[in-house]
Amino acid sequence: MSALEIDDVVVTHRRRGAAPVHAVKGVSLTVQPGQIVGLVGESGCGKSSLARVAVGIDRPTSGTVRFEGEPLHPLTSRRRPRRDRGLQMVFQNPYASLSPRRSIGAQLLDGAPDALARGARAAEVSRLLRLVGLDEAAAARYPAQFSGGQRQRLAIARALAAQPSVVVADEPVTALDAFSSAQIIELLQDLVRELGMAMLFISHDLSLVRAIADQTAVMYAGEIIERGPSEQLWQHAQHPYTQRLIEAIPEIGTTKRLPGREDDLAGTGAVATTGGES
Amino acid sequence: MSDTTLLSIEDLSVVMPTADGSLELVHDTSIRIGEGEVVGLAGESGSGKSMTASAVMGILPEGATASGRVMFEGRDLLTLSTRELNEVRGNRISIVFQDPTAALHPLLRIGTQITEHLIHHTGVSQKQADARAVELLDLVRIRDPHQAVTAYPHQFSGGMRQRAAIAIALACEPRLLIADEPTTALDVTVQAGILRLFDRLARETGVSMLFITHDLGVMSAIADRTYIFKDGTVVEHGATNEILNSPSHEYTRALIASRAQSLAAERTHRGGAR
């Protein structure tokens, strides 16, 4: 049984007085227990729309999402069914996903499956902080007292409080510098291995996805255009768009060499036709 | 590389008072930028690279003070009054930031934002400024510049907005362009285009650049020489690809090892990929 199974999902955003946006055009993707699947694509390709459907924040226009074999219940204002709490998400901006006014110890257990006795709470908070490589003294502090990389560790710890079997991580290291980013990548790999979770890792950066994911899927204009084992895909990319993504990644070279192609020099059209994110 | 020095930062320190005593954000740092040269500052968040650029531009955060000298065109920028500094920045030295959406006014047409800047600094007529705005958008390779001057920022993609911000920065033909993580928020293919644009502008206009990034791959592509920052000070500097291919400082080696490419290579080596 797959940990997460996305089957022929379509997401169409309908807007009053404008043409509908076909964000996701029939995508199927499965993540097996213990596996990290990378989903790579650039702004506006539909990966975030797909991520929101994959965790049940949004309802797909058509298609299904199964979590451990059962259909996922889209989120409502009511508390999530207990079973679905084993599916957790980590976002790009940890500062937005942590409450600035509550101490770490007070908010880390928000997603815990069972109410814990007072003594057990402190022990569980310490366990979670240790899992993400933070000192247990962090429990008494507030989000503003941590660096960007540490805040992302806290956001991961809070997701782990729910004892998830699947984590969807949407651009979890994009806001971090190279050092912090490398540390979070290694942490996520270790956690998946130690806790036997499955992970869908979403990023615009194919070199990051290659570093963490077992399988990689490349998304372009709402569709998956190429997929395969990460290293194989990197070494032998078939689709022109995947090849273009790889060429655009700046590498340390022996001489000054610009990434991309000569025709990248020019901007693409005077006025963007869609309101794509920046 | 050029022998003529355009900007010389000498023994710069930046100190910030805090509740627990004063904090030294930049310590005794010296940097030289030659005419027409692209110089890179690399390091992790909080290493002092952006703070050094802020000291040059006179835009340090509230309460922070700079000591040392920042010599540009025969004057020490640290000793100038706000009025004197205003004649230098935006005019002789300009800056491009990471987030072009924050740098552009959302309610003004792109053309207006360029002409306002030009009229303020150079006193040209509206008609001359209008013509120059089109030229500038053409210079940053925005297609159909006559139409683009009438557009609002929200009608542009992220990469196009950054091109517009670069056009504004180049409006007064500065001698030095400071670019602070200008491609960090962009998609890789868009980043490739902006890097190509910076490289072309340096060669076409002769503008010198101070390029700040934490991505050593970007640094390798764009900078002639690089300074590596750690904890507010320069730990290593030299020709970019000499430093990156044979780093002499342990910290530079650690930065290189933290790149995604290095992680992936190590993983393949370990046979970790399934």
Image (cartoon, coloured by chain):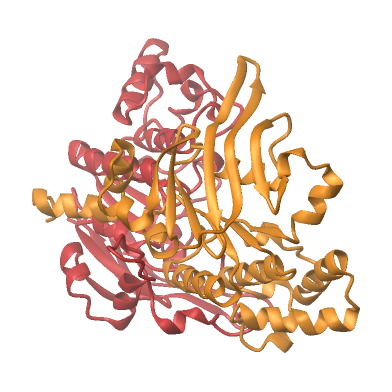
Chain colours: A red, B orange
Residue B106 left/right relative to A175 = right
Residue A87: x %, y % from top left: 35, 46
Taking the image as drawn, is residue A165 in sight?
Answer: no
Residue B259: x %, y % from top left: 31, 51
Taking the image as drawn, is residue B116 in sight?
Answer: yes
Residue A201 left/right relative to B133 = left
Residue A57: x %, y % from top left: 48, 55
A149 or B206, which is in the foreground? B206
Vertically, is B189 above or below A196? below
Please give the name of the residue rendered at 51% of the width and 70% of the height, measured from the top-left corner.
B194
Q: Residue B116 lies in what quarter of the image?
A: bottom right
Vertically, is B159 above or below B143? above
- Tell me the quarter of the image containing the C terminus of chain A: bottom right
The single residue placed furthest to the top in the displayed view is: A119
Residue A16: x %, y % from top left: 68, 76
Please give the name of the residue rendered at 28% of the width and 50% of the height, measured from the top-left corner.
A199
A35 or A209, which is in the foreground? A209
The single residue placed furthest to the front in the displayed view is: B3
Vertically, is A200 above or below B194? above
Please give the name of the residue rendered at 53% of the width and 82% of the height, measured from the top-left corner.
A266
Q: Residue A241 lies in what quarter of the image?
A: bottom left
A27 or B213, which is in the foreground? B213
A143 or B91, which is in the foreground? B91
